[in-house]
Amino acid sequence: MKRQIFAAEHDAFRDTVRAFLTKEVLPHYAQWEKDGIVSREAWRAAGRQGLLGLAVPEEYGGGGEPDFRFAAVLAEEFTRAGAAGLAVGLHNDIVGPYLTSLADDEQKRRWLPGFCSGETVTAIAMTEPGAGSDLQAIRTSAEDRGDHWVLNGTKTFISNGILADLVVVVAKTTPEGGAKGLSLLVVERGAEGFERGRNLDKIGQKAQDTAELFFHDVRVPKENLLGELNGAFVHLMTNLAQERMAIAVSGIAAAEHLLEITTQYVKEREAFGRPLARLQHTRFEIAEMATECAVTRTFIDRCIVDHSNGELDAVHASMAKWWATELQKRVADRCLQLHGGYGYMNEYPVARAFVDGRIQTIYGGTTEIMKEIIGRSLLG
């Protein structure tokens, strides 16, 4: 089915993204995976190409384009290229909204130009060793000392953790407040007492730096409070819909791409003297995946349009995230199986997609949390 949600400007942007990936990312990606981190030059190149800060106002160096369809194009093309290491989606779609919607004018002047140029790489630090989806369990705390906060705690599984120059930290500012006693504090590179742990050894997304972060009596200026004091819970709930949509967009894009390359593979690969595509089992597998992808694509595209129009709610974003990422996981497994032994080899895209995509049902809220959100909306 022909997609109907994009206009000529989105198609032109897709060409720009593909050219960027071909020139600035794919030739270096194998080395980045060996290094466990992408180069800073890649971030600066993304900034020069206008791929960072798409929704940031032009006065701060951004694209001034809040239309989420541009972000969707970016996510789809990075996913098809297998280039999760350069986490522009995290930077643009997850951290970006906090800075554009919550920062005051002074903070915007201080942080957004670098955000858009690629000189300032960002991260958000929510997860802790003992607290994932449960925000009430967060133990990182910030004590009010008059003109500054004193921040103490540990965060883990932080994407861009090694490279990040600006980290939005979720911390407890009112101990007895539970989830409603949390605030967002921005910690900048070089702050005394801010230390990075090891670059974590993951099964996939090897080029994407993921780290532990430690805060030991870090002095955070009062000017670095982002949004309302004790307002982090509301701020997080407001922005999680976009985070989940971004993950859903990459989920269906990954499933479609895996189906595409596997369809071509089974046409060429022979077994028992004939192509795998001639076997009824293979045809049924491809037919089932193609149908699941087509149905899912219709729903995701509707969600993209709704979100672009400011009409997508948290429940439908949770549905999109759950369904698209679980589909991605199933399709990756079935496509690897159809590749046989070759599917287990890292030189084949299906093998890398299998391990790179496994995190999709976990970060941004697990599938189980998505079901809980949906269930509560229906049953109270």
Image (cartoon, grey):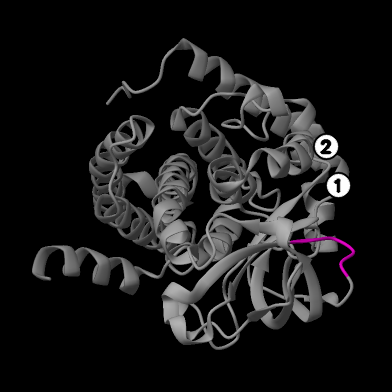
SS class, disc 1: helix
Residue named by callout 2 = 44
Q: Which residues are magenta?
A: 187-191
Question: Residue 134, can we see it?
Answer: no
Q: Place residue 338 in its image quadrant.
A: bottom left
Q: Quadrant of the N terminus?
A: top left
**Residue found at the far left of this picture:** 379
Residue 26 locus on image (x, y percent): 75, 40
Q: Residue at x 76, y 67 (%)?
A: 147
Q: Residue at x 87, y 41 (%)?
A: 41
Residue 157 locus on image (x, y percent): 64, 73
Name the kind of residue labelled 2 in the image.
Answer: Arg
Crowding near the residue tagged with mark 2, few <14, some 14–19, many ≥20 C-alpha atoms within 10 Å: many
Number of on-image labels: 2
**Magenta region, main secondary structure:** loop
Q: Residue at x 29, y 42 (%)?
A: 312
Residue 306 locus on image (x, y percent): 29, 34
Q: Place residue 302 in its image quadrant.
A: top left
Name the kind of residue labelled 1 in the image.
Answer: Arg
Q: Quadrant of the C terminus?
A: bottom left
* In-image side of 151 versus 127 (left or right): right
